[in-house]
Image: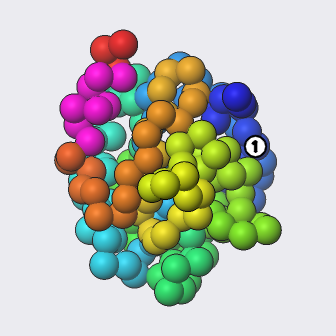
Amino acid sequence: MTAITDIPVTRTDGSSTTLEDHAGKVLLVVNTASKCGFTPQYEGLEALHRRYVDRGFAVLGFPCNQFGAQEPGDAAEIATFCSLTYDVSFPLFAKIDVNGDDAAPIFRALKRQAPGLLGSTGIKWNFTKFLVDRQGLAVERYAPTTKPEALAAHIERLLDA
């Protein structure tokens, strides 16, 4: 399987990169939206990021407008909202699609590595979360309704492995 950290992603400025800077870390990759009922999860995601960053953990946010058009802003608007409203310090990337023909390669890989219930691959809504181990492989998928704080024990288990 391909490590998530080897897959090209796009920064908010439109330039291409990979997540190589995060190789060897435990990651929580999330499709986010600023105008969703789950948007307050930014607070919990930021708390996890700050709590574990020194142990080799990072939250990575990928804004997505595919669900109810709940992420209508451009990169600057999204970054400003996240910073001013939730004091987000974890990395945010360019707005992407997570489903369909234009799905970002990273989400294609995440969905393949950690399918949903009954093997489903489609992302159902904003704030679907993927926990990635230090080898860069998605090991768990969490529904949008799963609150970030509920993931602490899972994160710690991977950090201690």
Question: Please, which residue is most extreme toward the bottom here?
Answer: 68
Q: Nearer the viewer, residue 121 or 103?
A: 121
SS for tag 1?
loop
Quadrant of the image containing the C terminus: top left
In the displayed structure image, the side of residue 48 where residue 35 appears, left or right: right
Q: Is residue 93 visible?
A: no
What's the residue at 71%, 63% (across, down)?
103
Q: Is residue 46 visible?
A: yes
What's the residue at 64%, 35% (across, down)?
4
Query: Where does the magenta region start and end?
Result: 151-158
Q: Nearer the viewer, residue 106 or 47?
A: 106
Q: Judge whether 128 appears above or below 115 on screen.
A: below
In the displayed structure image, the side of residue 18 where residue 64 appears, left or right: left
- The residue indicated by pointer 1 is 8
In magenta segment, residue 156: yes
In the displayed structure image, the side of residue 86 where residue 36 appears, left or right: right
Q: Quadrant of residue 158?
A: top left
* Residue 17 percent across, percent down from the top left: 74, 41
What's the residue at 55%, 58% (across, down)?
120
Quadrant of the image containing the N terminus: top right
Q: Nearer the viewer, residue 132 or 59?
A: 132
Tell me the kind of residue under disc 1: Pro
* Residue 83 percent across, percent down from the top left: 37, 62
Q: Residues within 10 Å of mark 1 (few under 14, many from 20)?
A: some
* Residue 117 percent across, percent down from the top left: 45, 55
Q: Judge whether 106 appears above or below 40 on screen.
A: above
Q: Nearer the viewer, residue 151 or 139?
A: 139
